Amino acid sequence: MASSIPETPDDQPEPILSVAEQCEGLFRRGQQLLEASGASHLRRFEERQQRFAAWTGYLGVFAKPAVCLDCKLRRHPSLQDITLRLLGILKTNLFRCKT
């Protein structure tokens, strides 16, 4: 069975940015679902969303291409790989989040 989670090509020039944008969209979708259902754990979810926003801001994930995290990690492929793996785990979990 094929996964409906969008994949990120390895040869993409800014793969961290791409996966982080997908996570950001999944956070928005999750928040909308939780708000609509009146879930009691909406506040905890929003706290995680804020932590993600702080993390991306601190590391410059969405910064200009010359100074973004992808650019900073180009010469450190192992760190880039770890970051992508962790973002992939987050993306998978956010995708599965229903309420």
Image (spheres, grey):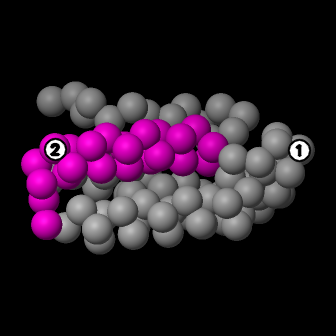
**Residue 67 % position (x, y):** 86, 51
Residue 20 included in the magenta stretch of the image = yes
Which type of secondary structure does the marked residue at label 2 adopt? helix
Res 39 quadrant in image: bottom left
The magenta segment is: 16-40
Q: Relative to residue 13, is residue 37 depicted above or below?
A: below
Type of amino acid under label 2:
Ala
Say whether residue 2 is left or right of residue 73. left
Mark earlier in primary sequence (1, 2): 2
Which quarter of the figure is the N terminus placed in? top left
Residue shown at the point (74%, 57%) measured from the top left: 60
Total numbered circles: 2
Which type of secondary structure does the marked residue at label 1 adopt? loop
Crowd tier of the residue under label 1, counting other residues whose Cα lies within 10 Å: few below 14, some 14–19, many 20 or above: few
Residue shown at the point (69%, 47%) measured from the top left: 62
Residue 14 included in the magenta stretch of the image = no
Type of amino acid under label 1:
Ala
Compute the Cα span from label 1 to label 2: 39 Å
- Camera-side mark, 1 or 2: 2
Say whether residue 49 is left or right of residue 74. left
Q: Which residue is mark 2?
A: 36
Say whether residue 89 is left or right of residue 72. left
Task: Find residue 66 and name its label.
Answer: 1
Say whether residue 96 is left or right of residue 13. left
The chief SS type of the magenta part is helix
Q: Is residue 56 visible?
A: yes
Residue shown at the point (29%, 55%) measured from the top left: 93
Res 75 quadrant in image: bottom right
Res 3 quadrant in image: top left
**Residue 46 % position (x, y):** 36, 62
Crowd tier of the residue under label 2, counting other residues whose Cα lies within 10 Å: few below 14, some 14–19, many 20 or above: few
